[in-house]
DNA sequence: AAATTTTGAATACATATGTTGACATTTTGG
DNA sequence: CCAAAATGTCAACATATGTATTCAAAATTT
């Protein structure tokens, strides 16, 4: 069996798109989500893979459901 | 500011429920998902927080969408 | 009840996530 | 164009995820 991998750039692009739709900066979002700004930057560039916990905090800060973000990621796969 | 955290036991219970619904063991699921069996065990017990990557591999192995699992988690919150 | 399968648990370890601070680069707005 | 804001990037570090092995405990099966 082959091991599917999740394209981190897609994850990052989706999160960045949600953030921009809200019209807030990385600085503001990372502050609300209580995660490091450079960390969020790395996630959006696909250089870090967030835990479900981190995605949850981002989704709460963005005021959307995790499942909305995840659905968007899956649509982009 | 408030600090939302994702209850790992809920995440674990949902994943375990999906697995049991499929009628397969941790051994079999971890094999399909290509993750360690003890790791899956720890996730199901809420002692490890999976990355989105790991959840993706589990969802593919379970033949369900990540968003289905995530929706179930959010319903349980 | 005995045997088998499944799961929990502990260890030691490798690798990745996540943090803070500083500075460079790019983008945006006046 | 210029200043300010936003983002990219690097380093050093702390912490957590994820690995493999082993054994115990619990659940199934016969």
Image: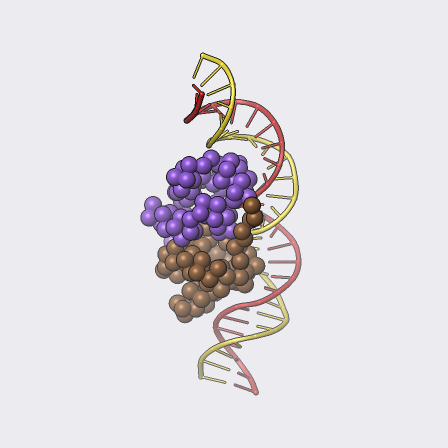
Chain colours: A brown, B purple, C yellow, D red
Residue D11: image location, x then y, percent: 66, 58
**Which of the 4 image quarters holds residue C14?**
top right
Residue B13: image location, x then y, percent: 40, 40
Q: Residue at coordinates 50% horizontally, 61% vertically from top-left?
A: A10
Q: Is residue A44 above or below residue B8?
A: below
Q: Is residue A77 visible?
A: yes
**Which of the 4 image quarters holds residue B36?**
top right
Q: Residue at coordinates 40% horizontally, 48% vertically from top-left?
A: B69
Q: Residue at coordinates 43% horizontally, 68% vertically from top-left?
A: A20
Q: Residue at coordinates 39% horizontally, 39% vertically from top-left?
A: B21
Outermost residue on the left side: it is B75
Residue sitting nearer the eye, C19 or A48: A48
Residue A76: image location, x then y, percent: 46, 62
Residue sitting nearer the eye, C10 or B56: B56
Q: Is residue D3 above or below residue A31?
A: below
Residue D21: image location, x then y, percent: 62, 31
Question: Where the N terminus of chain A falls, by quadrant?
Answer: top right
Residue sitting nearer the eye, A35 or D3: A35
Q: Is residue A34 visible?
A: no
């Amino acid at each position: 069996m082959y091991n599917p991998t999740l394209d981190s750039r897609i994850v990052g692009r989706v999160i960045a798109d949600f953030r921009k739709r809200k019209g807030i900066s990385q600085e503001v979002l990372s502050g609300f989500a209580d995660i490091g700004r450079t960390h969020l930057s790395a996630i959006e560039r696909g250089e870090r893979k967030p835990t479900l916990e981190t995605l949850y905090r981002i989704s709460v800060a963005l005021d959307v459901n995790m499942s909305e973000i995840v659905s968007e990621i899956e649509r982009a796969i």
